[in-house]
Image (spheres, rainbow, N blue to C red):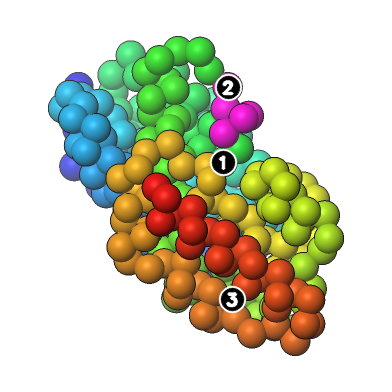
Amino acid sequence: MIDIQKAKQEIKKYVSKYDIENERIRVKIGHIERTASIAKQIAKSMKLEKEDIELAELIGLLHDIGRFEQVKQYNTFIDKDSINHGELGVHILFEEGFISNFIEDRQYDETIRRAILNHNRNRKDVETTNNKELLHSKIIRDADKTDIIYMLTFEDKETAWGNANMEQQKMTDEIYREFIEEKSINYHKRKTAVDILVSHFAYVFDFNDKHALQIIKEKGYYDKIYNRFHFEDKQTEERMEQIYQIVKKYLERQ
């Protein structure tokens, strides 16, 4: 049995031990709440059973639990500069035993564990052959990216991309090439905040469910993100325009 209301109460208790005055902590509290809601919407749009709708919402609440300790220890959201937050979340929930605070029924443990491990991986790197685990990995990955893209329309640049003066930076050739040729960004190759921005535009190619893409298109999230920037480097400005147009055309086709 999944008690969503109890899980919501417990997540509030869990995050209360962190510094809620820290901007990064504040951002993640809002993010997990919205991601859980989006995951529920996606599961409903897929006409799943009540059990899977509730499980999708629960995974949404828990998927970024590792972020709070990551911020406390490293004061960053950049995994390559700190720790893989998905793996840290699984450690907290299943090795430190916090999972029992959120759900008593152990039958869902492996699905929750696998979905959290997969949520911040590229589609090609998702690990599982179990249909239920794969289903919930796809739902949380889509819900997570939908809300991240939404947050990037308004969140301050230092919090979102780790640099308040991004317009002075350049897009690296390797990241530009990966977007144009492969449409999949190797996060470990990102060197600048602009590279991180490009990887956020590349999210659009990594969605599984068209319901999430429809939300992004109708709300004009990528238009709003693009309009936040005017880069000093001419080549970077031109490349960003090209990337933006590719994403717009992709959304139209979908």
Q: 110 left or right of 6?
A: right
In terms of sequence position, does the residue under pointer 3 or pointer 1 come before the other?
Answer: 1
Task: Give whichever of 32, 146 is nearer the camera.
Answer: 146
Q: 7 left or right of 17?
A: left
In terms of sequence position, does the residue under pointer 2 or pointer 1 come before the other?
Answer: 1
* Label 1 element class: loop
Look at the numbered discs 3 and 2 and tell me whether their residues touch, using CB distance below 8 Å. no
Within 10 Å of disc 2 (Cα), the crowding (few <14, some 14-19, many 20+) is some
Label 2 sits on residue? 127
> Mark 3 to mark 1: distance in Å?
21 Å
Kind of residue sitting beneath label 3: Lys
Q: Quadrant of residue 58?
A: top left
Residue 126 magenta: yes
**What numbered label is drawn on residue 54?**
none
* Magenta highlight: main SS: helix
Residue at 57% across, 27% down: 126
In the picture shown, does residue 45 fall above or below 248? above
> Mark 3 to mark 2: distance in Å?
32 Å
Residue at 18% across, 42% down: 5
**What numbered label is drawn on residue 157?**
3
In magenta, the rendered stretch is 123-127
Label 1 sits on residue? 120
* Label 3 element class: helix
Kind of residue sitting beneath label 1: Asn
Residue 62 magenta: no
